[in-house]
Image (cartoon, rainbow, N blue to C red):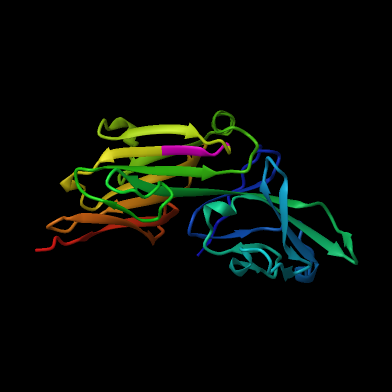
Amino acid sequence: MITEIYCVSGISGVEDHVFISSGENVRLSCNNALSDCKSKTTWIYYYSFRHSGTVALITLGIKNKDTEIHERLSLESDCSLNIKNVTEEDYGLYNCRQYVNDRQQGPDADVLLHVLHVSPSSSSSSSSSSSSQTEISPGRSVTLSCQLYSYTGYSCDDWVSSEGVELLWVNQAGVDLKTDSRYQISSSSSDQDHCIITLTTTLLNEDDNREWRCRLTHRNQLKTSVRYTVKYSAPVASTTLTPVRSSNSEKTSSRTTAAASTQGS
C-alpha cells in the first residue's frame, strides 16, 4: 500500500512533509523531475539533524547497494522514491536532485519524512519498551509508548505550539483517553527532540477486544494513526502483544493483537 503525501508549509522551510506510520509503504515525490528522469535522478538522505549525516541512496538512477535500506527502495518513472515497510529509523530529510551532463538542473526537491511508531512494555515482562512482543496478563500494568520521529530541528513543544502537531491516545470511538481516570497519559520529548506520548493502564478481564489508538493530528486534521487491540481467550494464563499490519479509512497503519495462550492442566 502506498500512502498519500501530506504537504505542510512552515516547518523548517521545507515544502513537503510526509507523516507515515511504521510498517507502511510510502512514496516521496521529486517535484523538480525532468522528462525521462530516471537516469538523471539522485536521492540523498540526511539522517541526523545534529551531526549532518548523509548518504546517497540513489545516484543517477542506480541504487547504492551499500546501504541497509537499498532492498526496500525503488525509483518510479516520475522519479519519486518508494520506501517499503517504513521503520522508525527511516525518518529524516530526503533530497532529490536532477542532473544532465553532470550539471544539476533546477533546485533541490526536499521532503521531510516523519514516522509514527508504537512500542509496548509490561510489568510482567523483562522486555524493554522497544520490543515488538511483550508478555502480559490481566491484572498487570501495561504501557504503550507512541513516538513521533521527526527531523525538524525544533523541540517537540515548539513544534506543537507553532504548527499544531499533536499526539493523542483515543479509544475505538475516538474519545480522548485523558478523560478516563483509568488511563495515565503523559507526554514528553526525548533527547533527539522526538515527541512521545505514553498510555499506562492495568488490564482488566473486560479488555477483551479493547482497542486503543495513537493519533497524529496536524491542526486538528488526522494524518496517521497506530492502533493496538487486546484479545483474551478463556481461561487466560498469559497474553502476547504481537504486531499485525492493518489499515482503515482513518489511515491506521498497524494493529497489535494480544493472542492468548491456554492454561496448562
Report which quarter residue 80 is drawn in: bottom right
Please state the horizontal and vertical placement of residue 75, each as a whole percent of the image.
67, 68
From where the camera sits, is residue 234 visible? yes
In the shown orientation, is residue 206 left or right of residue 107? Answer: left
Q: What main secondary structure does the magenta stretch of the protein show?
A: strand
Residue 78: percent from the left, percent from the top?
Answer: 70, 66
In the depicted structure, whether residue 138 falls above or below residue 231: above
Q: Tell me: residue 181, above or below residue 68.
A: above
Q: Is residue 231 visible?
A: no
Assess whether residue 32 is covered by the magenta stretch.
no
Q: Out of 157 and 142, give the one closest to the viewer.
A: 142
- Residue at the front extreme of this rendering: 126
Q: Residue 99 appears at what percent x and percent y?
A: 84, 63
Q: Is residue 21 left or right of residue 42?
A: left
Quarter containing the C terminus: bottom left
Residue 144 falls in image quadrant: top left
Q: Is residue 194 magenta-colored?
A: yes
Q: Quadrant of residue 142?
A: top left
The location of residue 130, given as percent across then percent down, is: 43, 49
Residue at image location 50% in from the left, 59% down from the top: 24
**Residue at image point 43% right, 43% down:** 146
The segment highlighted magenta reads 193-197
Residue lying at 39% horizontally and 60% vertically, measured from the top left:
246
Residue in the foreground of this view, choosing between 107 and 194: 194
Q: Position of 206 compared to 10: left or right?
A: left
Q: Residue at x 29, y 53 (%)?
A: 135
Count of numbered circles on the image = 0
